[in-house]
Amino acid sequence: MSIKRMLLHKVVAKAYEIGVLAPSVDTDIDDMLDMFDIAEFDDINNKTKSSAANYVENEVVNFKTNKNMAANSGTIVDALEHAKEKYPNDLEMQGKYLLVCLSLIRRDYGDSVKSIQAPYLHYNAILTAFPSEGMVWCVWELYSGASQEGVGLERLTPNTNEVSLLFSSNPSITRPIIPNLMA
Amino acid sequence: MPHYINKFEEAVDTIPYSNSWVDMANDVLQLIFEVFYDDCPLFLTMQSLPGQNGDHFRTVVFEIYGSMYLYNDLVRDDHMECSQLERIIQIDKDWNNVVSMVLYSSDPTPEPLSQVVLNVYKHTKTKVDWMPSLNKRPQ
């Protein structure tokens, strides 16, 4: 393993340790670092191992105060848009971003985040819902055995009971699945 | 091609099929205790006291790669009756409202057991710590 790569591992490990990242998806380490908007890997390469930890802590502070987030960051939809820009043709990677974002929401607003498990078609569906901006947002994950077959985001508007599918990493799911699950 | 959320789940799902579910359960245990143990920041082993019918649970609750898992054996007279591995999707600090997903089970039609198992530990005196030897086949 190169020194650069080793330091990158240290950076992400520190982020896990202090809870800024929840490694619930097996995301490539470089992709994880994109979350911190670290554009210049050489910056890290020039630092010693101990200062790499300090570097991360500064990044964490920036992350928490949104200094490092793009101007349109703030909601799960914004995170999704960010992922679409980063990986325009990679639905799986966009889905992973969505799950990382969900982990952060669960960490910060755990009491408001609820999950259920339900069968959907031949899948095992995990639905995680949380309220925000007067609407209910639902992230679904579809599993066949242990294999993840798709991730999606839906928005429910309580007043009108309107459900919109905002994202699906599974090309065969093109309509909201929540109405079927609630039926 | 299957997609897994981490390499632990991939390892569990790709355990070679065996006609003996005990052998497969042993393979799962081996992965937990020997292959992935060092990557677990949380690792808790529990064993319940035998009930009137001689049944008791042996349970491992562990965290790996940011997800929490529960492995459970139902043991009767030193013989394993069934085993199951679940990923815990949601749990509160009192071990209530548990939502989990079955990843491996010796039962062909498994239901998530995490809530039931954790309730046993909440309401009964438990013995903590067990280290597995290979499980014995049911007679």
Image (tube, coloured by chain):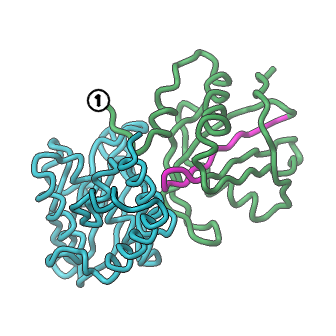
Chain colours: A cyan, B green
Where residue B1 appears, as percent x and y from the top left, is 29, 29
On screen, B122 above or below B15?
below
Circle 1: residue type: Met
- Residues B19 and B45: in front is B45
What residue range appears in magenta?
B63-76
Identify the image quadrant of the C terminus of chain A.
bottom left
Instruction: Indicate left or right for B65 with B93 as reference.
Output: left
The answer for which chain carries disc 1 is B
Depth check: A2 or B75 in front? Answer: A2
Q: Residue at x 27, y 80 (%)?
A: A66
Residue B116 at x, y = what percent?
66, 55
Quarter-wise, where is residue A100 in the image?
A: bottom left
Give the quadrant of residue A146: top left
Quadrant where the N terminus of chain A is found in the figure: top left
Q: Secondary structure at mark 1?
A: loop
- Say if the magenta span includes residue B58: no
Q: Position of residue B36 (x, y in %)?
A: 59, 40
- Which image quadrant is residue B137 in? top right
Magenta highlight on residue B65:
yes
Image position of A108 with respect to B57: above or below: below
Residue beneath disc 1: B1
